[in-house]
């Protein structure tokens, strides 16, 4: 009897029942990487600053959308982009000439940069800047935003190209790091002494942190491992190291070069050849509170309330009465005011403790943002996939396998990036901007973000208030870094490479402390108005010394450790927070630079600890009983 196999048809309910555990686990995995930083920011605002969360429902929905977006995006990478990249990385080095492979490496780095989720943050970072304070910076983020992203992509592409050359010719990573850092130091000092170029430093150095995300790193590592298998000695444990470092340094040079070019062309805002729209400085939101000498804070009456007062003579809102001008006298036991103006002021409403009454921003156009996010995702993902597909067919001459999975992966990647960008707009950016705007309340009086009235300073001494803000930055960086999934993977790799000499837990603590110190230094820089060059040049000169003294393997993973600090969650939150702090500290034109300092911190701590571990291991081996003294 012939038995025929029949396809099993599942209904929607059965399909969901099978997929649900997988979806749930992947969603929870993304929540694990988000929860600490979100809860920490919310608790700091509520418990330390004593301010409620504004637009709480919108922020909560945005965070859920971010987690969903990351879930789909990472699954799309696994099913779609990564198989293409790994196949090309394994076969291309055998089938292509060096010039052809270098061209592919450059285009891969360029395309991967456009597909990075965090790169979209750069396109929206300039909306709150005042062009009169930093005209060239304002133009780069607004008039030349596409050129800025292209410059970052060119920097990453050049870095991947240099990394491939390094693998082919066996160059030491030190040979590339030392001249690059010296060039960056010279450019930074040059820009620091020019008032137009100086505000550009924070943006340029932060762009180096934005590039090493979940798209760029796996793709370029796949190519690097493939090259090392062909030209190396079979040892691939070091294959990925170095490219991430170069991909975080080269974009800084590219952005500085772009800014200096526009500076020479005099085509930025306010310059002689400026051809763009004459933007006015972003106007502050309508005054929500005012302060009068001796009168405290008050909320302005609306025209409707004033007309009602004219008609009825009554004011429904709680008010206080004060008098200005004239003379005052005590007559027959009464206080008599002659020729004084009577002023009625509406008292600010008592703020709730946890959540503000307005839980959703009425000006947010969700459908419009969704459409913009979809177009951004399509422009980023589709060209990169086409490039990889054409490379696979025309250069590698490999057939496309598992087409259904690849198509599903690309769809997931587009959907994930769309949701991620929408979640940033609704959740992460408002949360980061809100807290960043409110943190200066520890040492200055300000109007809380999205509220009325005045708040702060929480401490009588500005010094203590600023130290609280600095400690906030440290614990934010420390906790958020330990929650990064990429740090666990790096720790396991380093422990394996060093045969247990540099333990995973030691590396994780070193990186987390370094990031915490870096973000704390960034908050300190904004609070005291310190020039960014003062904060960057000395650490990088110290890094040059540590690099020259350290062994090659410690240099490899020490410099790459900065890449794990700039995940898709950390970048938009820290960037939005920095811009919020900068916008509310007198004298600060912007809040860029925190990400840059968060990147240099872990390199210093890891190289320092690695140097000590290396020396200790060598000494222990030398003094081991039975060994020759």
Image: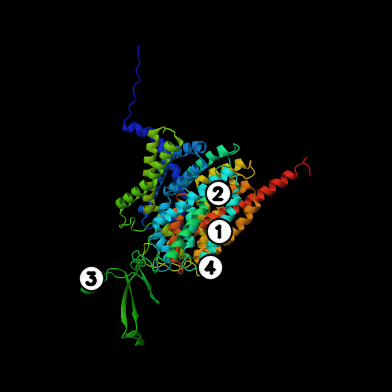
Instruction: Quickly name the residue at label 2.
Output: 560
Tell me which residue sits at (61%, 58%) in the image: 542
Mark closer to the chain start, 1 or 2 = 1
Mark closer to the chain start, 2 or 3 = 3
Task: State if disc 3 and disc 1 touch (CB < 8 Å).
Answer: no
Instruction: Quickly name the residue at label 4.
Output: 463
Distance from label 1 to label 4 (Cα)?
36 Å
Distance from label 3 to label 4 (Cα)?
47 Å
- Crowd class of label 2 (few under 14; some 14 to 19; many from 20; radius 10 Å): many
Instruction: Quickly name the residue at label 1.
Output: 183
Seen in the picture, residue 619 relative to 471 is either above or below; the reply is above
Instruction: Quickly name the residue at label 3.
Output: 308
Mark 2 element type: helix
338 displayed left or right of 225: left
Task: State if disc 2 and disc 1 touch (CB < 8 Å).
Answer: no
Q: Quadrant of residue 347?
A: bottom left
Tell me which residue sits at (60%, 53%) in the image: 605
Seen in the picture, residue 491 relative to 398 is either above or below; the reply is below
Mark closer to the chain start, 1 or 3 = 1
- Crowd class of label 3 (few under 14; some 14 to 19; many from 20; radius 10 Å): some
Mark closer to the chain start, 3 or 4 = 3
Which mark is in front, 1 or 3?
A: 1
How many labels sit on residues? Answer: 4
Which mark is in front, 3 or 4?
A: 4
Distance from label 1 to label 3 (Cα)?
67 Å
Observer-nearest of 464 and 33: 33
Distance from label 1 to label 2 (Cα)?
19 Å
Mark closer to the chain start, 1 or 4 = 1
> What is the x, y in percent for residue 601?
56, 55
């Amino acid at each position: 009897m012939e038995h025929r196999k029949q396809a099993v048809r599942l209904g929607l309910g059965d399909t969901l029942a099978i997929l649900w555990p997988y979806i749930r686990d992947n969603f929870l995995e993304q929540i694990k990487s988000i929860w600490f930083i979100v809860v920490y920011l919310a608790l700091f605002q509520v418990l330390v600053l004593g301010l409620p969360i504004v637009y709480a429902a919108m922020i909560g929905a945005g965070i859920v959308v971010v987690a969903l977006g990351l879930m789909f995006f990472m699954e799309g990478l696994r099913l779609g982009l990564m198989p293409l990249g790994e196949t090309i990385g394994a076969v291309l080095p055998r089938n292509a000439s060096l010039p052809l492979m270098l061209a592919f490496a450059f285009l891969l780095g360029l395309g991967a940069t456009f597909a990075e989720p965090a790169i979209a943050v750069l396109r929206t970072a300039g909306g709150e800047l005042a062009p009169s304070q930093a005209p060239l910076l304002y133009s780069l983020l607004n008039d030349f935003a596409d050129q800025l992203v292209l410059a970052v992509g060119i920097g990453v592409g050049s870095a991947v190209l240099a990394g491939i050359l390094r693998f082919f010719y066996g160059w030491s990573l030190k040979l590339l790091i030392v001249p690059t850092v010296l060039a960056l130091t010279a450019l930074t000092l040059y820009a620091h002494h020019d008032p137009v170029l100086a505000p550009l430093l924070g943006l340029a150095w932060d762009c180096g942190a934005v590039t090493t995300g979940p798209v760029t790193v796996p793709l370029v590592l796949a190519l690097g491992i493939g090259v090392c298998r062909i030209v190396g000695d079979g040892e691939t444990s070091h294959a990925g190291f170095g490219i991430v470092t170069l991909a975080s340094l080269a974009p800084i040079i590219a952005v500085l070069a772009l800014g200096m070019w526009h500076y020479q062309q005099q085509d930025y805002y306010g310059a002689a050849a400026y051809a763009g729209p004459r933007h006015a400085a972003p106007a502050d939101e309508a005054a929500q509170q005012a302060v009068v000498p001796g009168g405290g804070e008050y909320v302005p009456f609306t025209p409707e309330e004033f007309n009602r007062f004219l008609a009825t003579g009554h004011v429904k809102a709680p008010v206080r009465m004060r008098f200005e001008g004239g003379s005052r006298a005590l007559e027959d036991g009464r206080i008599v005011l002659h020729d004084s103006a009577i002023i009625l002021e509406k008292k600010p409403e008592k703020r709730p403790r946890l959540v503000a009454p307005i839980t959703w921003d009425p000006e947010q156009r969700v459908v419009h943002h969704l459409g913009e996010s979809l177009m951004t995702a399509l422009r980023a993902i589709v060209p990169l996939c086409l490039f990889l597909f054409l490379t696979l067919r025309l250069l590698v001459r490999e057939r496309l396998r598992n087409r259904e999975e690849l198509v599903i992966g690309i769809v997931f990647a587009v959907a994930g990036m769309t949701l991620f960008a929408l979640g940033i707009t609704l959740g992460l950016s408002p949360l980061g901007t809100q807290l960043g705007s409110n943190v200066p309340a520890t040492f200055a009086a300000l109007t809380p973000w999205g509220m009325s009235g005045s708040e702060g300073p929480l401490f009588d001494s500005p010094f203590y208030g600023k130290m609280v803000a600095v400690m906030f930055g440290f614990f934010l960086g420390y906790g958020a870094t330990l929650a990064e999934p990429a740090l666990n993977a790096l720790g396991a790799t380093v422990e394996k490479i060093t045969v247990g000499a540099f333990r995973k837990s030691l590396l994780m603590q070193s990186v987390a402390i370094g990031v915490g110190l870096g973000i704390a230094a960034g908050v300190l820089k904004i609070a005291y108005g310190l020039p960014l060059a003062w904060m960057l040049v000395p650490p990088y000169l110290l890094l040059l010394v540590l690099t020259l003294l350290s062994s090659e393997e410690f240099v490899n993973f020490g410099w790459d450790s900065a890449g794990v600090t700039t995940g898709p969650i950390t970048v938009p939150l820290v960037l939005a927070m920095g811009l919020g702090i900068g916008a509310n500290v007198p004298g600060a034109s912007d809040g860029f630079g925190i990400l840059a300092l968060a990147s240099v911190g872990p390199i210093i701590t890891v190289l320092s600890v690695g140097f000590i571990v290396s020396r200790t291991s060598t000494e222990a081996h030398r003094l081991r009983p039975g060994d020759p003294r």
